[in-house]
Amino acid sequence: MLEFLWPWAFLLLIALPVLRLTLPRKSNPQTALTVPNADDFRFKDQLRSMLASGRRWWRLILLLLAITAIVTALARPQWSGDPVPLPTEGRDMFLAIDISQSMQQPDMRLNGREATRLTALKHVVEPFIEEREGDRLGLIVFGTGAYVYVPLTADIKTVNRLLQETPVGIAGGQTAIGDTLGLAVKRLLDRPIDHRILILMTDGSHNSGVLTPEEAIDLAVEANVRIHTIGLGSERTNGRYPGFNRYYRRQSFMDTENLENIASKTGGQFFRATDTNSLERIYDQIMLIEPVVQDPETLRPVKSLVHWPLLIASILFSFLWWSRR
């Protein structure tokens, strides 16, 4: 879109003719030529007068165009492009999702129907991610091992899409909480120190991996990583899920004490979610605790066009000067 930074400069196009008309003209007396017979000069004078009159008109037109170009340059024309979103300095936040086999336990309700823990979690986390515009989000999935599924990125749509596509069990059937914390700390070390966040969501207790939760907590505290923990489902499973009764007997409880310890020592909070409604309230609370730092900003690129009217004025003035020679 074409804009003028100083549009009032066009008032000069009105002021210049007004000054020309109001200022007194300088008298220029000429000496009369006396000849015995003026008939010989009559045709030549008429022809010369006609040529001179036409020449004055196109010179006047070129002069007016040159002055208009100068005034246009004074008005500082510029071309404004479409708004471009600017990267915002938001939080660096990893979501660590437990995808062990126990997350298939159907003890949650969604839209009046039974739903697995992972299905309910995906449903609630989706709008939470959409509201984190301006943050850099990453996704860690864990079971027997911990893996960076999506590295930190401002592309929250991709994070959401890949979360919804995450299946149960691809990381193994156990729960490596210590390794998950250690992996998140490692990936957050090179990020700005003020906003390193991890949200850990699990329904079990630590029973796998190299790092213990205590060792991982020490690393998180040293790296200034704030960890919020969310415990999903009931503390005691009812063993209703077919094919996994043996697994549930081996891991039949959630270690809430460990999750509380992780949150409190790293400056975060522990939340307990027994149904979809409570899980939604938890993410509302996290939005209040960890608000988006700033609204996304846009920049409208501006390109100056001053050089074009100046170039046109220069060409016109040069031509007028050359034509007088």
Image (cartoon, rainbow, N blue to C red):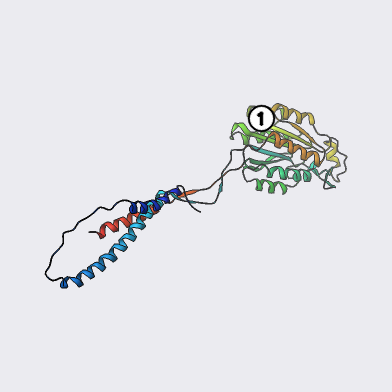
Image point (70%, 37%), residue name: 287
Quadrant in which residue 130 is drawn: top right
List the residue tagged with mark 1: 220
Residue 239 x %, y %:
87, 41
Quadrant in which residue 253 is drawn: top right
In the rendered structure, the answer to whether residue 107 lies left or right of residue 125 reads right
Residue 147 x %, y %:
68, 41
Image point (64%, 43%), residue name: 133
309 in relation to 175, above or below: below
Front in this rendered view, residue 257 or 73: 73
77 in relation to 270, above or below: below
Residue 318 x %, y %:
29, 56
In the rendered structure, the answer to whether residue 274 lies left or right of residue 222 reads right
Judging from the image, what secondary structure is the residue with disc 1 in? Answer: helix
Please rate how many residues cluster around mark 1, counting C-alpha atoms within 10 Å: few if below 14, some from 14 to 19, many from 20.
many
The type of residue carrying mark 1 is Ala
In the rendered structure, the answer to whether residue 73 lies left or right of residue 320 reads right
Front in this rendered view, residue 64 or 288: 64
User: Of all residues shown, which one is farthest toward the left?
Assistant: 36
